[in-house]
Amino acid sequence: MRREILVYPDPFLARKASPVAAVDDRIRVLVRDMFETMYAAEGVGLAAPQVGVGKRVVVLDVSPVDETIAPVAVVNPEIVWRKGSATAVEGCLSVPGVQGEVCRAESVEVRGMDERGNPLRIKAAGILSRALQHEIDHLDGVLFIDRLSSSAAVSAK
Ligand code: NI
């Protein structure tokens, strides 16, 4: 089922999400709905708070940018390692019409669980690294517009 995407400045987007205690059917339905919602909106990532759920769950499918990377859902994602820095233009389904340059770590390692509750470890660079950091930010109530490079121009799409 497709869910409604909250849009800035909805205060829910600024809230910190809670860890998932158990990966159960409710979480699996949430993950399925989040993928459906993300694909319908033509996004490459979505975090549960964007659909009004204060749980630490993200879904990503960056295959429109890099077709070699499979879709992934991460429950309780945590960045355990980061290296380098890179600046690129980002947008967000919750901040329609706005794009801007954001500096992030170039590579990250993320640990968490998959939608079956199995441990998951992702080492990522490039678009997947950026998307993971963007989505994990959502879980801490942080939007990309909070991280814009001061010199970067914000432009309407
Ligand atoms: Ni976003």
Image (cartoon, rainbow, N blue to C red):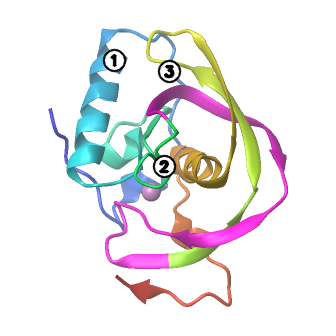
How packed mark 2 is, by other alpha carbons closer than 10 Å (few <14, some 14-19, many 20 or more), is some
**Looking at the image, which residue is at 85% across and 57% down?**
84
- The residue type indicated by label 2 comes to Arg
In the rendered structure, which disc, 1 or 2, sits on the residue that comes first in sequence?
A: 2
Q: Where does residue 92 sit, x and y in percent of width and height?
A: 41, 63
Q: Where does residue 121 sit, x and y in percent of width and height?
A: 67, 24
Q: Secondary structure at mark 3?
A: loop
Q: Secondary structure at mark 1?
A: helix
Q: Label 3: which residue?
A: 20
In the rendered structure, which disc, 1 or 3, sits on the residue that comes first in sequence?
A: 3
Q: Is mark 1 within 8 Å of ligand 1?
A: no
**Looking at the image, which residue is at 16% across and 39% down?**
2
Which mark's residue is nearer the viewer, 1 or 3?
A: 1
Q: Is residue 128 above or below residue 103?
A: above
Q: Magenta segment, which residues?
A: 70-99
Rounded to the nearest whole Å, what is the CA distance between mark 3 and mark 2?
Answer: 15 Å
